[in-house]
Every structure is written in C-alpha cells, then in structure tokens.
Image (cartoon, grey):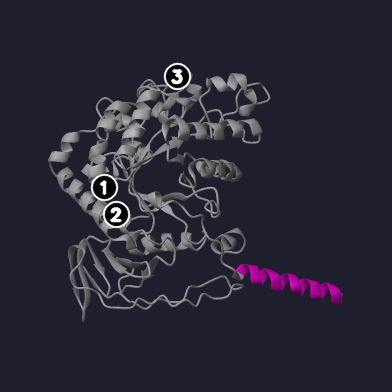
Amino acid sequence: MKQESSRNLAVAVLATFLAAVPFVGEAANAWMQEARKSPEWFTRGVMYQIQPRTFTPEGTLKAAKEKLPYLKDLGITIVYLVPVMKMDTDMDKGYWSPRQIKSGFNNPKNQYRIADYFHVDEEYGTDADLKEFCAETHRLGMKVMFDLVYLHCGPTAPFLKEHPEFTWWNADGTVKKGPWRFPKLNFAVPKLREYLIGNMRYLISEFGADGFRCDVGDGIPLDFWCDAHDMMDRVTGNNAVLLCEGFTVSDQYKGFDADYGWFPGLNAASVRGAWTGREAQCPVGSKFVNHYENHDVATDARPRREKTLGHAAVEQILVWMFTIDGVPMLFTGNEIADADEKHSMFGKTPMDWSQLDREPGKSRHAFVKRLAALRRSHSVFTDVNGKDGLTWLDTTAKDAVSAFVRRNGRDTVLVVQNWTRKPVTCGVSFSVSKRSTASYLAPDETNRDVKGTIVPEPLLAKDATYSSSGGFTIGALGYWISTVE
C-alpha cells in the first residue's frame, strides 16, 4: 500500500510538471537548436512569383524573359516560377481537383498535376526557352527558383507505367488518390526517391535552377528533403535552397532553408503574437518567406485581397514584409495593385499591364521599388535572422500599434506600425522583458533592451510624427521607420 501511494504521488508530480511546461518535447528541442545556414542571395533577397498564365498576354517563357529587366528594375533578386513542366492531359474529371472543376475552364492542364518532371509543357514553350529564361535571369544578376510537385502526379504520367510501385494502389487495382484526387506518390519506395532527387539534379545542371519551392513540402517525409539538400549542397557548393510550402517545427535543421510565412491579419497583437509563438517553437535563426497573396490565394479569394483589405492596408503589409525578419515575396501583379477577379491558375488570364500607368498601380509600383531600395541600402534588415536580429517592443496601444527593432551589432532600425483605420497616439518602450522559457530550462537572461535615441528624421514614414516627450502620433494605417543612435 505504501509503495502504491508513493508511485501514485510520483505520477501526480510528473503530470503536474508536464502540464506546466508550455512546449515540451519536439518544440522545445527545436528551439534549443540552430537552423541551417543559407546563402546570402536568399536571406538578403526579394522574391517575385511568376504565374506565366497571368504575367504576359502570351503566357510563355519567351514573353516572360522579355520582362525580366522590369523585375530587375523593381528590385527583385529572386524569380520564382510556378510549375512549367508537362502537365497531365487526362480528361477524366475523377482525377481533377474540385478547384480545377469549379474554375469552369474545363482545362485538364493543372500546373500542380505533373505528367513529366523533366520537360517543359508546350503551353509555355520548349526546354530551350526555359534554359534561355534562366540564363537571362542570371545575366541580370538574379536567381531563379522552380516549383517542385512531388506529393502527387498526373494519372497518366508515363513513369507510372514503368514504375507502378511509385504510387499507392487500392485493393481493387485502382490508383489511390491523394488529397486533391491525384495519384499520391509512395515515398516508402527507394527508387522513387532516387528518381525525384535525380530530377532535382537535372533541373540544376540542365536549366540552372538555384533552388526550389516545394509544394506541400510538409506532406512529404522530411528525411527525403534532407537527402535532397545533401545532393544540392554537393552539386552547388552549398549555394542552393529549398523553400517549404508548409511548416513543421524541426524542418529547418537540415531539410529546408525557409518555410512559408502567412500574414496573420490587421491587428497589432496578432501580428506580434503569431510571430513570437512560431519563433518559440523553431530552431534559432529560422527563416520565413512572407507574403499576403500567392497563386492559391489569388485564385480562390473573392474579392481579391487588394479589394477586401484596401490599398492602404496592403501597403502597410508590404512595409511589414520588407522590414520583418525573412524574405518578402510578391505575387504577379502585387506591385501594380492588381485585383482582377478573372484571375485563375487553371487557365490563361493575362493581367492588364496598363495598370502600371494609372492609379493605384503607378503609386504602388513606386512604393514597392522604394521598399526594395530601403531593404537593399540598410543591411540591418537582412544581416541577422532570428532573435538576435529582431526584437519586439511593447507599445501603450498593443492592439493597434506594433513595434520592433532590427539589429546587427552595429546598427538599429525601429519600425512602428498602426494597424487600425484611425489615428493613435502611443509610447514605445525600449525596455525588453527577459524571454520566458519552459520551466525545466535555464532562463534566458540576455539583456535585449534597446540603447540609444530615435533619430527624428525617419527613413520612411506615412502620417506619423515623433516627439521625444510624447511618443508617436500615427494616422490611420500609418508607419514610422527610423534609425536609433
């Protein structure tokens, strides 16, 4: 009886201890580790996602190549292509995604339902056109990333005939469908892994891909991406990257260089809380590609984000994207405030480039160009990833106004943003609380207080003033960016 009581007490104490630990296990272990290092072309980059069906009236790689100088002038350093490899042409709608059917295009060619991973779809041109596109991107001093779709494939993909074991099968002999009703690939098969890693090697050597965005990357075993990155490191001398569409707390140890970073909404507390909550789980120095719209959102969201949020709110998000830790990503047309609701990834829907010559497109283009120049001329925004490079500051209007500093050991830049549609007067504290940790860890006693005074002349500001005695007065969706000396 005495032994049983002692055992029950020990179990109760252990249960109480585990309940008190906010992120025990994988999350805590991730936080204790360092994220993999990535090449500077990526960490200092500004990314632009090209949807060929929208980017030019022709919808081809040749036409897209002609607009690369425009992207260079805008301040883009990384060009990311949605998939341009051969799409499946099977008309059996049992293997079409619900979104594809709903689009109304009656087009079997879905960019994310690939039949041949090695050759360009004739809709976009030829293999030679892709080589020329990549060569011109490099000639202009930019990098190019391809989109990998390895979770599933098209139902008539030729390699399935030679290797039926590459996919899963039902007991009745039919192909097992994945989440989008496409044949799901079987990563338990070693030859499939060899085939796909060989595909990546081919895309690097034959076309000059500098990295890859991995569609539903968190739906594929992480050890595959680790093996893939090992191959890339050997082939490129540690100069290629993998971007995960998705997120797991430990994927940036070795497999991925960054995850998608979704904008959490127009609320200062949410903007800060979403970031710090994720940071507390990830390896130190983890990186995120930040955006508010991509090919999926632009296809599905009605009205488009430009209309639901409004131009002023989108510009506030752009300020956040270009100054927060990580890599900003623009989707085709974001830089000219495109909000065309005919847009769809399932058919050719060219955007109207005349928006560049009228409002609000003309002002938006100039604004994006200015943000890219600001990021380029102040390396403090890109020198250090993680907690040593980004420090959140308390404000006296925490639901309305967010504030943070970017630091690199030499320079400090302050970013203050009013996320509401009314003026706010508030103070910003340079005193930073010690970081809380799980109860079984030694507390982080690093002093992260901000030293110095705010330079009264901002680097960039909108409807915002600073008084050394009264703090900030910031208009609706206004912002203030300045150095601290």
Question: Which dot, 2 or 1, sits closer to the camera?
Answer: 1
Q: For the stretch drawn in magenta, what is the main secondary structure?
A: helix
Magenta-tinted stretch:
1-19
Q: CA distance from mark 2 to mark 3?
A: 39 Å
Task: Name the residue at 55% across, 35% down.
Answer: 197
Residue lying furthest bottom: 469
- Check disc 2 and report its element: helix, strand or loop: helix
Residue 75: mark: 1
Q: Position of residue 418 (x, y in %)?
A: 26, 64
Task: Name the residue at 42% across, 53% down.
Answer: 288
Q: Specify the amino acid type for callout 1.
A: Gly
Quarter holding residue 438: bottom right
Q: Considering depth in this image, is 312 or 142 the residue closer to the camera?
A: 142
Q: Specify the amino acid type for callout 2.
A: Ile
Q: Are marks 2 and 1 in contact (CB under 8 Å)?
A: no
Say which residue label 2 marks: 317
Question: Which dot, 1 or 3, sits closer to the camera?
Answer: 1
- Horizontal placement of 481 versus 119: left or right? left
Q: Specify the amino acid type for callout 3.
A: Thr
Say which residue label 3 marks: 89
- Reply yes or no: does residue 278 show up in magenta: no
Relative to 408, does residue 306 appear above or below in the rendering? above
Rendered-image quadrant of the N terminus = bottom right
Q: In the rendered structure, which disc, 2 or 1, sits on the residue that comes first in sequence?
A: 1
